[in-house]
Structure formats: C-alpha cells, structure tokens
Image (cartoon, grey):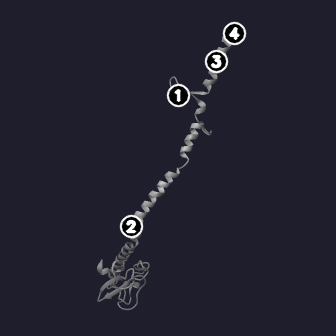
C-alpha cells in the first residue's frame, strides 16, 4: 500500500512538474520564472507592469510647480530686455528703408541722368513722373513696387537740393529733432 501511495505521489509530482514547466519560461541556466509574470502583447500585465505604468502616466504636482517657478523667473529676467527692443528694431527698419530707397534713387538716376525733383518726390520710383526734369529713360516696371512708410506710419521725406538728395524719417515723435528713438533718421547720418 505504501508503494502504491509513493507511486501515485510521484505520478502527481510529475504531473505538477510538467504543468509548471508549461507555464514557466527559462531565464537562466538554473533559474525558472513564472511565465504569467511576463507581459504578453495585447494583454494587461501583472502588478509590476502596472507599477511601471503608474510611474510613466504623468508629472507630480511638485514637478509642475518647479517648472512654473523656473518659467516665472525667466520671464522676469528676459521680458524687460525683449520689451525694450521694439524701439531699436524700428530705428533699424527705418535705416534699412532709407538705404533701399537710396539704391532705387541711384538706379533712377542711372536711367534718367538726374534724381527726381523734390516736387516729383519718391512717387517717381513707382510711376512715371511728369514735370522737370523729364524722365526719358524711366523703367516701365518702376524702381520699387510700393512706397514704404516709416515704422511709425509716416511717409519718408524726400529732398533734392541742387542734385543732392536726402531722405528723412522724423522718428517716433513724428516731429523734427528729438533724441533716442525720437531723433530724426536721415540718409545723411547713415
């Protein structure tokens, strides 16, 4: 009877071992791991994979607060420097416009042997001028497509005094004279 019991016990152990080996995955030489712990594609994993998902799901409140504080500090330091630059940018844009208009006037002079008169003005760069001096070689495509305004919304002032030209922007204050961004910007000063 004992032999029968031992035989049945060993048979049950073999059955349990074979069932266990079907559900195990070999990890190392003498180490076995339960295959139910290995996450399968398309299936939700076990507790350890759920813990990994919790770690990846989002930011903590402290992390978000740290980022907000850093952005606040950067804003406080950088914003004043950026906000003071538009005035400088407008002055530089006016200087660039004056150089562009000067180049267009030089090409006009090459075609017509004279600059436009003060009466003809900068419009002579866009459409054929009338009056003296006559523009016999005026380019039918014009010299610029459109007359620009200065960065403060005013037209540029054109002067031709005895063949010597000058272009002027009155600056931010839109009046003659001034200092800083209110100063007049002229082709003579570039």
Spatial CA distance of label 4 from label 3 is: 14 Å
Relative to 97, residue 24 above or below: above
According to the picture, the residue beneath numbered tag 1 turns out to be 27
Secondary structure of the residue carrying tag 4 is helix
Disc on the earlier residue, 1 or 3: 3
Disc on the earlier residue, 4 or 3: 4
Spatial CA distance of label 2 from label 4 is: 94 Å
Relative to 84, residue 7 above or below: above
User: Which label is found at residue 13?
Assistant: 3
Disc on the earlier residue, 2 or 1: 1
Disc on the earlier residue, 2 or 3: 3
Quadrant for the C terminus in the image: bottom left
According to the picture, the residue beneath numbered tag 4 turns out to be 4
Q: Position of residue 148 (x, y in %)?
A: 42, 79
Secondary structure of the residue carrying tag 1 is loop
The nearer-to-camera label among 2 and 1 is 2
């Amino acid at each position: 009877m004992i032999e029968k019991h031992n035989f049945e016990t060993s048979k049950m152990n073999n059955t349990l071992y074979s069932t266990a080996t079907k559900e195990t995955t070999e990890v190392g030489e003498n180490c076995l791991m339960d295959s139910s712990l290995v996450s399968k594609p398309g299936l939700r994993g076990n507790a350890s994979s759920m813990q990994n998902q919790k770690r990846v799901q989002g930011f903590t409140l402290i992390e978000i607060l740290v980022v907000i504080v850093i952005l606040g500090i950067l804003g406080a330091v950088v914003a004043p420097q950026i906000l003071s630059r538009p005035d400088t940018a407008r002055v530089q844009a006016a200087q660039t416009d004056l150089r562009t208009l000067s180049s267009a006037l030089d090409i006009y002079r090459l075609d017509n042997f004279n600059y436009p008169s003060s009466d003809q003005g900068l419009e002579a760069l866009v459409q054929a001028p009338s009056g003296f001096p006559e523009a016999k070689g005026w380019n039918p495509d014009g010299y610029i497509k459109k007359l620009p305004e200065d960065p403060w919304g005013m037209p540029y002032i054109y002067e031709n005094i005895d063949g010597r030209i000058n272009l002027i922007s009155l600056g931010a204050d839109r009046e003659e004279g001034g200092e800083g961004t209110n100063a007049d910007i002229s082709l003579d000063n570039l």
